[in-house]
Image (cartoon, rainbow, N blue to C red):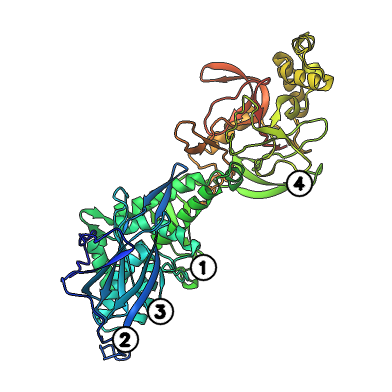
Amino acid sequence: MYSWNKRAILGCAALSLALFACSNENSDAATSVAVQEPELEDNSAKVGIVENLNSAHVDGRAASLKDFNGGQERMYHYYELASKVRLYELDSVTLDTTGTMWRGYVLDTNGNFSFDSIPLSSPYVMIEAVPAEDSEVNINARAIIDVRKTSSVSVNLLTYMESFRLRYLVQSGMAFDSAKTQAKREVLDAFGFYDEPLDYEKKDDPSIQEYLDFTGWHVFRIFRDSVMTEFSQSGSIKGCETLKNLDGWPMKSHISWVANIVHSNAYKLDIPYEYYEAIGRTEYYQYAKSQVNHATNFFSALLGLGKCTADLNGAYADVQDGYFRIQCDGNRWSIVLNGHKQIDHSEGTMTDDRDGKTYKTVTYNIDGSPKTWMIENLDYGNSERKEWCLDLKPENPNFNSHRWNNIRLADSSGCGIYGGLYRAYDALMLDTTMLAENAMDSCVANNSAITDTAEMMESCYYTSLNKAKISQWADSVENANGYIQGICPDGWHIPTTEEWSALMSYLEGAYTYESILGDPSGFGLNAIGQISNGSGFIEKNSEVYFASKPGPVAAYQNQVWSWSRKIDNPLIGYGIDVLISFVRCVKN
């Protein structure tokens, strides 16, 4: 008799490496006989229609599962060519195995298999697929089907979970069809997929793959044999005593593990979709987003919150000592950062009269004084003042502020979500009087190979600036006007180092990136990604700078000359003739 709780089965030796072979657990010959089928009406087994299934056919696919580790796709549960597949005939009253088994094999790298012309005595069969030996999640997936109604099936870890509950319901007297419908709904609810019309048993439906990828790890780590037994009897994980303390691994650890899925994937989503699109890695973004959404729903199930409805509007639960908060808006559960410092702020908009573009703004009360910042990078340029855009590509996905690589001149539409990049000459609206003495002549002489006069002049404007002159000019303009407008719209200005410092001190401890989990600071940074040359992992690029008033700055007992500022740490930017920066303007 088949052991339902064991993960691997030692089958009989294969007669030959054929598509499938008839086998028998009790060494009896396989024959087609009349069977009895339970009915639903009075919850008791009744004699049903006698079926004679002499030539059943089933096509299927053993579903492999993947995740992304640092941006690299990785199969954690998979099947290879000739992976074993078994088809068991089941008793139509108890869904116990009858002792008759057919053996088949995976036919290709997509996990497809086929059983043809199978003589059955019962319409109910269980199909079991054995993953590759080195699969990290090494569970034999299985599915129970009625071959009269289903001839094509996906065998996966959700159908595996369903099989326990389905068998219990049938043995309790429920008709197979009703039991299967109920078990399928309860499996989905156990993961918080409330009302999702997912037919995870459907073979050729790519839309279910993300759900299979997410749930596979949890079936392996959480729904272990003892939990599965309890789920099979109750159809729910709410109040599951075994789950609360499974093999010394308490519920808090389960919650922490799911929270880590949220945290690691939300971090990737600080980098906007446009970056992944530019480098040809949108599947990584979509994967991370689905992982966060699915983990949020799973939290609601693990915490016993149930489906988010109008009656639960405003309900919430804190996770990991309040680091995350799960909250219901009357329609769906969402998750927000709650453990970071929450910054009081108000949001608004401003419109640049020069080109009609509208930018989001934020106002903080810093040291008792309101200060309004743009929370989107300036995206403006004209024929005289150059705006550059990120120009990342799949073959070259990294941006370096010092080398001016992977950038292009902006066209009439601007630069999009990241806004423009500017050299000091353009951001500060400098002119040729700011060139170093004789530097222009020297620059031209050193670039005599350049025959285009305009190109030579432009190059020398950027590389021959006089820091001392610029510092004096900046102080003089600030003393006269109170600020340096630079390339900012009228009524706004380039921030000073003191304004940057005051802002960073005010936001200290807050999360400053625009995130799928919210933006507690209101500052709305969009991270730029970078791909590690060694590992291929996608990370945030920390070498990103923003324009500031130029001049000498005392920092860490060292005085440096700066015209830009890093955001994610207190370091001061440098290199007016080297660095290219974004611009965030401050209201006058």
Q: Secondary structure at mark 3?
A: loop
Identify the residue under disc 4: 357
- In the image, residue 464 lies at what x, y percent? 73, 15
Label of residue 80 in the image:
none
Identify the residue under disc 1: 331
Side of 550 relative to 34 (left or right) = right
Residue that appears at 40% across and 79% down? 149
Vertical order, 33 against 529 (above or below): below
- In the image, residue 468 lies at what x, y percent? 71, 14
Q: Whole-Å distance between the Cαs marked 2 and 4?
A: 72 Å
Quadrant position of the C terminus in the picture: top right
Q: Residues within 10 Å of mark 4 (few under 14, many from 20)?
A: few
Identify the residue under disc 2: 51
Contact between marks 1 and 4 (CB within 8 A): the answer is: no
Residue type marked 3:
Lys
Q: Nearer the viewer, mark 1 or mark 2?
A: 2
Identify the residue under disc 3: 149
Q: Whole-Å distance between the Cαs marked 1 and 2?
A: 46 Å
Contact between marks 1 and 3 (CB within 8 A): the answer is: no
Q: Nearer the viewer, mark 2 or mark 4?
A: 2
Sequence-wise, the earlier of marks 3 and 4 is 3
The total number of labels drawn is 4
Sequence-wise, the earlier of marks 1 and 3 is 3
Q: Using the rendered view, name the quadrant where residue 409 is placed.
A: top right
Q: Whole-Å distance between the Cαs marked 2 and 3?
A: 13 Å
Side of 256 relative to 368 (left or right) = left
Sequence-wise, the earlier of marks 2 and 3 is 2
- In the image, residue 33 lies at what x, y percent? 25, 84
